[in-house]
Image: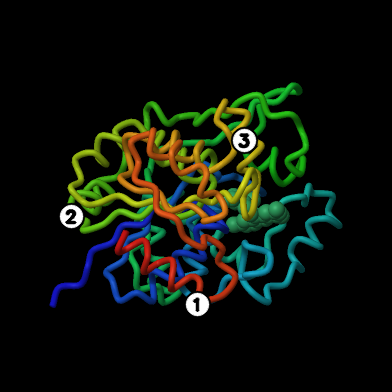
Amino acid sequence: VRRLKVVALAGGTGSSKLLRGLAKAGVQLTVVCNVGDNYRVHGLYVCPDVDIAMYTLAGVADRSRGWGIEGDTFETLAQLRRLGAETWFMLGDRDIATHIFRTAAVESGATLTEVTARLASKLGVSAALLPATDDPEETMVLTPGGVLHLQEFWVRERGKPRALGVEYRGADSAEPTAEVKEALETADRIVFCPGNPVTSIGPILGIAGMRSAMSRANARKVALSPMVGRGAFSGPAAKLMRATGTRPDSAGVARLYSGVVDALLIDSRDASLSPLVEREGVVCVLTDAVMDSPADETRLAKEMLSA
Ligand code: FO1
């Protein structure tokens, strides 16, 4: 029998839990990763959302931190600090190998798509891992003190500055890759992982031509909300949703995905938001949206595939 072709749109930490569940679901999995939070540091090209998906599917992700490789050491970073370099963005020693490999490949002409496939294969990932675009795109946060890259806002400034807006710089002239378009067109189901709708999934949907590629896809499109009440399970979702004028709850998520997804799974505790979700033209499905264990991850993956 032919395996179900599933395309998952993924951002960072929140997304990776569902990816783990999907990887165990016996489907042919393609992961389309956000690239808006890619960041250059010490001359290295770091792609956090590609890497969290890759390390998660390779079974080496650090689950407690939500980024990097489990058991990694930070000797290189300590030495960089001795040399007086800025070290607020913490790179582990083994993680740095990924960035050296990627930077060298891209500088000798490989696309991000090509080098990601090489890295994933070497790490034993069987799912297809695709950056959403090979073109430059950067998620920028507008603050009273100026425009900050998402990593500067979230990691260096610890998400503290007031956020006035979010911009996907480069998105207008970026294009989904041929691999992404093909995956979407041939998918049986498209799953939106519970990533931050503004900084994880938003930059994917913001790429010129991505929404139309989505609408050309016949597959049913199902999203899992990352919000319970007025907060997210992790990360700066609520603050940045407010900054973009969206209510920071699952009704706001439905508004952002309106016209793109067919159904949104939200936590049962937010059952009262169901009419607001459906007003956006999105079928609302109530579930236990918390993923605290591998059993939760598997259960939610199954629910996403049958919703
Ligand atoms: N997040 C942090 O909060 N602090 C860090 O020092 C940090 C380093 C880091 C290094 C590599 C990497 O792939 C991710 C890293 N992250 C770190 C996570 C990252 O900033 C965000 O969580 C993602 O961009 C959100 O999707």
> Label 2's element?
helix
Residue at 54% in and 41% down: 199
Tell me the amino acid under the disc marked 2.
Thr
Is 72 situated above or below 244? Answer: below
Residue receiving disc 1:
295
- Return the x and y of residue 133 as percentages of the image width and height: 37, 43
Depth check, front residue: 300 or 180: 300
Mark 2 or 3, nearer chain start = 2
Tell me the amino acid under the disc marked 1.
Ala
Q: Nearer the viewer, mark 2 or mark 1?
A: 1
Residue at 59% in and 32% down: 140
Q: Is 150 left, or right, of 294 in this rendering?
A: right
Is 293 situated above or below 46? Answer: below
Residue receiving disc 3:
240
Q: In which image quadrant can residue 302 be found?
A: bottom left
- Quadrant holding the N terminus: bottom left
Is 292 situated above or below 254? Answer: below
Give neighbour class at mark 3: few <14, some 14-19, many 20+ (Cα, 10 Å): many
- Return the x and y of residue 13 as percentages of the image width and height: 57, 58
Mark 2 or 1, nearer chain start = 2
Tell me the amino acid under the disc marked 3.
Leu
Residue receiving disc 2:
186
